[in-house]
């Protein structure tokens, strides 16, 4: 429910990730996480490019300014999740923000692999910068493509980390 001054209320998911994965059958958690992100996040980036306010841009810039390859894995991952959530908020759709929040929870274990090395953290920051640049210039198609490229990089980093 939404009302003046109430904000958005996100309800707890009705099923755990394990239950959802069991229902889905087949595939690995890694594949499911990558597919979920590839379905929702490019559209979020595109909408954010069209709808972001100057306040949204300042928040995204602040997270980028704090992000670098020398961070510890946990802090890098925290800023990564924050960047993607702020991007969803910039899309100005509370349902997408709620979905992004849930997706971040569901994909957390897989995502931490992409932040396990300095190279991975550097790739994450670079991807976020490219997404931000497209959102800042209100170029929806470029934002979508930058997110697709970023997610492809993340998939490769996760695959490499889990093979090691």
Image: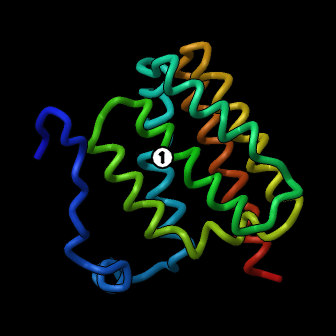
- Residue 17, given in percent of the width and then of the height, sits at 37, 78
Q: Quadrant of residue 133?
A: top right
- Quick check: 9 above or below 137? below
Colour convention of the picture: rainbow
Compared to residue 122, the image places residue 113 above or below, namely below
Q: For mark 1, does the 10 Å Cα neighbourhood hold few (<14), some (14 to 19), or many (20 or more) residues? A: many
Q: Residue at x 70, y 68 (%)?
A: 74
The mark total stands at: 1
Give 108 or 20, whichever is nearer the viewer. Answer: 108
Q: Nearer the viewer, residue 27 or 2?
A: 2
Which quadrant would the C terminus be assigned to in this image?
bottom right
Q: Residue at x 40, y 56 (%)?
A: 101
Q: Would residue 32 be found to the left or right of residue 134 on screen? A: left
Residue under label 1: 85
In the image, residue 111 lies at what x, y percent?
62, 66
Taking the image as shown, residue 134 lies to the left or right of residue 47, namely right
Taking the image as shown, residue 42 lies to the left or right of residue 128, namely left
Residue 48 picture location, percent across and down: 46, 27
Quadrant of the rendered structure where residue 72 is?
bottom right
Coordinates of residue 15 in the picture (x, y in percent): 24, 78
Position above or below: 41 against 92: below
Q: Secondary structure at mark 1?
A: helix
Residue at 80% x, 49% y: name it: 123
Q: Is residue 24 above or below residue 82?
A: below
Q: Given the current orientation, which residue lies at the most extreme front position?
A: 5
Task: Give the quadrant of residue 97.
Answer: top left
Of 129 and 27, the residue lying toward us: 129
> Which residue sits at x=65%, y=34%?
146
């Amino acid at each position: 429910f939404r009302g003046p001054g109430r904000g958005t209320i996100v309800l707890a998911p009705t099923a755990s990730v394990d239950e959802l994965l069991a229902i889905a059958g087949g595939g690995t958690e890694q594949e499911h996480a990558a597919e979920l992100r590839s379905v929702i996040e490019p559209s979020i980036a595109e909408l954010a490019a069209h709808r972001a306010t100057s306040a949204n841009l300042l928040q995204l810039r602040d997270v980028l300014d704090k992000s670098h390859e020398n961070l510890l894995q946990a802090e890098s991952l925290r800023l990564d999740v924050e960047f993607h959530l702020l991007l969803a908020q910039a899309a100005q759709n509370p349902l997408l923000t709620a979905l992004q929040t849930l997706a971040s929870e569901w994909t957390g274990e897989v995502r931490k692999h992409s932040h396990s090395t300095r190279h991975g953290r550097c790739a994450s920051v670079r991807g976020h910068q490219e997404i931000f640049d497209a959102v800042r210039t209100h170029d929806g198609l470029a934002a979508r493509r930058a997110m697709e490229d970023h997610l492809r990089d993340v998939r490769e980093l996760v695959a490499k980390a889990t093979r090691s």
